Amino acid sequence: MTNPLRGQITINLGGTDYQCRLTVDSIIKIEEELDNGILKITQRISDADIRMKEMSVILLYALRGGGNNFQVKDVNKIIQSTGLINCSAAVANLLVATLNDDSEESDGKKEAVTA
């Protein structure tokens, strides 16, 4: 079960629901691996400028933060089965949903992200 108070959201990739959470540790790992700040990465993704490695890294750490025990090859299979367009949209929505301040949300609940 998703706990929005802990920053957890559900993301649907290829018809399967996954729990995701961008913890502080996972954000640090994403920033280190991609050599960019999370806000800059989010901005580029919202401008439809995302690389496959970025998509894979973000999903890997978000899925692990949600309690999933995935390796890079597992995430890459999910990306392939979901499709690049749907997956990139889901990653963009995931980042926006998890990085937004709760005061910016109308009802205080984080919504599920679907691809």
Image (cartoon, grey):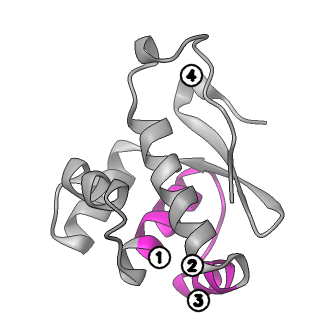
Which label sits in the foreground, 2 or 3? Answer: 2
CB contact under 8 Å: marks 1 and 3: no
Name the spot of residue 63 as percent of width and height, x first: 58, 60
User: Is 18 colored magenta in this rendering?
Assistant: no
Residue in the foreground of this view, choosing between 103 and 44? 44
Element marked by disc 3 = helix
Magenta residues (range): 55-80
The alpha-carbon separation of the residues under discs 2 and 1 comes to 11 Å
Residue in the foreground of this view, choosing between 19 and 88? 88
Residue at x 51%, y 67% (from the top left corner):
88
The alpha-carbon separation of the residues under discs 4 and 2 comes to 30 Å
Provide the residue designation for mark 3: 73
Residue 11 located left or right of residue 92: right
Q: In the image, what residue type sits under mark 2?
A: Leu
Element marked by disc 4 = helix
Q: In the image, what residue type sits under mark 4?
A: Leu
Disc sitting over residue 84 in the figure: 2
Name the spot of residue 3 as percent of width and height, x first: 66, 29
Provide the residue designation for mark 4: 5
Q: In the image, what residue type sits under mark 1?
A: Ser
- Sequence order check: which comes first, mark 2 or mark 3? 3
The alpha-carbon separation of the residues under discs 4 and 3 comes to 30 Å
Provide the residue designation for mark 1: 56
